Amino acid sequence: MSTNTISEKYNELKGIAAEKVKDLPKKTVIQVGMATCGLAAGAREIKEAFEKEIQENEIDALVEEVGCMGYCYAEPLIIIYKPGFAPFCYGYMDEGLVNRLVQDFLLNDDPCYEYALVALETNDVFPTFEDFPRGVYEQKIILEECGFIDPTDIEQYISRGGYSTLAHALTQTPQDLLDIVKEAKLRGRGGAGFPAGAKWETTQKTEAETKYIICNGDEGDPGAFMDRSILESNPHLVIEGMIIGAYTVGATKGYIYIRAEYPLAVRHVEEALQSCYQKGLLGKSILNSNFNFDIEVFHGSGAFVCGESSALVQSMEGKLGMPQTRPPRLATEGFQGKPTVINNVKTFAYVPHIVKEGAEWFSNIGTPDNPGTAVFSLVGKVNNTGLVEVPMGTTLRQLIFDVGEGIPNEKNFKAVQIGGPSGGCLPESTLDIPIDFESLHEAGAIMGSGGLVVLDEDDCMVSIARYFLEFTQQESCGKCTFCRLGTKHMLNILTRITKGEGDKASLEILQELSEDIKAGSLCNLGKTAPNPILTTLHYFREEYAAHIEEKRCPALMCKDLIAYYIEPSKCSKLCSVCVGSCPTEAIYTREDGLKAIDQEKCVKCANCMKTCPPDYNAVIKLSPPELLAEKEGKK
Amino acid sequence: MELTKEEKDAVNEEVHELLQTFGKERENLIPILQNVQEKLGFLPGQAMEKIAKHLEIPAVDVYGLVTFYNQFRLNPPGENEVKVCLGTACYMVGGHITLESFERKLEIQEGETSEDRKYSLERVACVGCCTMAPVVTVNDEVEGYVTPTRVDGIVNSLEEQGNSTNNDDTA
């Protein structure tokens, strides 16, 4: 088919899209961030409130659902586009604020600067993203459109140039496209960083009638949610990447594997696929070319190990999701025994950008060996939680203290857990290492899925290590003995340590087992499972020692090693908030009117500590609990 | 959990109907199970046996798969489904304490359904609302900052709702 008809067909689609959005700039548009995080914070109520107010006041405005901008700490978020004003973004929305914005901004012309977070266009009065430290470090490529377009409306994607890269790619030879991806040195964003070009080349060169391409959206890592966010907020970008990939390697059928726990992502992707079929972007003769390609959604059933590609294929074939020995590589013998390319959601999302802007553009971002950007979900004890995209090579310090704006409540930074259950905990001293696949690996962590949990002085490292090990132990598929039994054994040891029952030999055994599990496991789940323990043992050994030798938890977190105590000198006779807050009625009033805790009944829920008025701050934690006798003896 | 005769008949009928829409290939197993669970809320033993027969595979293969994946459940969900998030951020601020409070208050363990089927309690890995930790979802509504006292409040309000709908029925 000639080049002409492909571009003609695309221009036709683009024309329709342009027609549909052409009136938007003349209209007031309110975009409400309605990805899962926004919905949880009450975005639906905000949207309904706007619709109601607009109707009541007879305003000519449109309320749109958009995805996630990544500023999760300020959810629910909205953007108001009003002709004559720069678009403003407002956070921490509630119904009162909706009313205020409608009355003051929509009906009158006061944009309520005191509630605005940021302006989206440069203007004379209000700062834009570039004026904040976060804007300086961030460079959004795959998150660029997230939160600014309606993910369920294909016209919005097309009108912003979407699918133009596909139209261009279909006029190139598969070899040309492969060369671009290889030259760009795009590395798989699933965690291991395997060069995508090499994978694609193997599949392309393997002779077979049927080839598959699979998008891995089985994001099972607790604390990471970027794949979900991209699929929810901009599914067409991933689909476009997949179609280009399929054309490059010669695949005729694609699957998007999404966790069943992400119902919104499933819905958005399914809707997106449908509109692609309607537009002739999927199915037979895509954009009038002679290339045929179909995509289906496969609902994953929630097993962490299925993020490993050979386990993922097993589960798609209706079997237990157990990783398989290689060779054969999936690229030559994958799903149903056919050559299969499996890449992460983010990897596919980069493809349209790379093909459009060229390999050189991509290599100029980040570092020479790790070109491009990295997407992190920044959570835990950090001020600006959310999704961030920074060039590779940015340091952890910049990420946490500039982009994340540091630790809340004036606490001290203790560690950053990076890479989820397969990653490690890095202390202050490692914060200046640049973020890339190799540097993180050297420090003992991994890039992994990009989950980044910031820990402060109140977090116990032993407990954290135990938490992640408990996760991998439960999610171990059970195929390899070391992973199945070794992690269980390690978990038992760590549990004993957090209960103050550990002994000196424990640490040696932990170290030994860690190395054995690494050596004796087939897949990366097992190979990386000991990472949280190895890094905490390496960087925070004294904390383990305190648990074992002094039966003390320095962070006052391990329940069995602490006791709650009400300091009589600070407690007031006039207050009894804590008494009511206690779920087990463990707090009683002493003869002198002050309050005290019955240790037998106390379940250590910390409620009394939270409810004790700041004027008194009388509830304290003691570790080891033996200190209690000393305190009570004194009285 | 024992099912009544009517429930068993209903299960048979629903599963039978669903199976008509699927071929006998092994790769249909997970989609079939997902569809059955969506219809019934859980996977009773007899449903698994019927599915095994349809796909001509041993029933133990179906059971093995059901217990392997987190999505599938063997107990019927309660009228009120409580899910406590134990993702990293929630765990750090005491998600496990919240879970314990629910266990104490509802007198069931995590993964169980109460005898009267009014409540079921589960843990989930991460609902993606890390900024409001600790998070609990009650009948798919997300509740943020759930302390043990809030647990009492949540359960009490569910009790009250239950009582008021019962009264409506009798009125």
Image (cartoon, coloured by chain):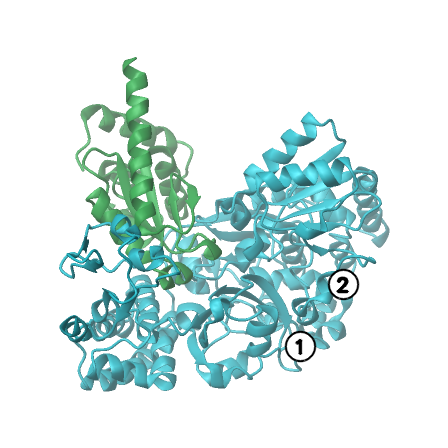
Chain colours: A cyan, B green
As drawn, the label of residue A366 is: 1
Would you place residue B142 above or below residue B15 in this image? below
Q: Could you say where residue A241 lies in the image, as x and y percent from the top left?
A: 65, 58
- At label 1, which amino acid type do we have? Gly
Q: On what subunit does the disc labeled 1 rest?
A: A
* Mark 1 burial class by Cα count in 10 Å: few <14, some 14-19, many 20+: some
Q: Could you say where residue A315 lies in the image, as x and y percent from the top left?
A: 40, 55
Q: Are marks 2 and 1 on the same chain?
A: yes
As drawn, the label of residue A79 is: none
- Nearer-the-camera pick, A316 or A622: A622
Residue found 33% across the figure and 41% down from its top: B154
- Nearer-the-camera pick, A141 or B81: B81
Res. A213 in view: no
Would you place residue A151 above or below residue B128 in this image? above
Q: What kind of element bears circle 2?
A: helix
- Nearer-the-camera pick, A466 or A92: A92
Q: Could you say where residue A452 lies in the image, as x and y percent from the top left?
A: 49, 69
- Answer yes or no: do the residues labelled 2 and 1 have beta carbons within 8 Å? no
- On the picture, is A332 further left or further right than A104? left
Quadrant of the rendered structure where residue A47 is?
top right
Residue behind mark 2: A356
Q: On what subunit does the disc labeled 2 rest?
A: A
Quadrant of the rendered structure where residue A326 is?
bottom left
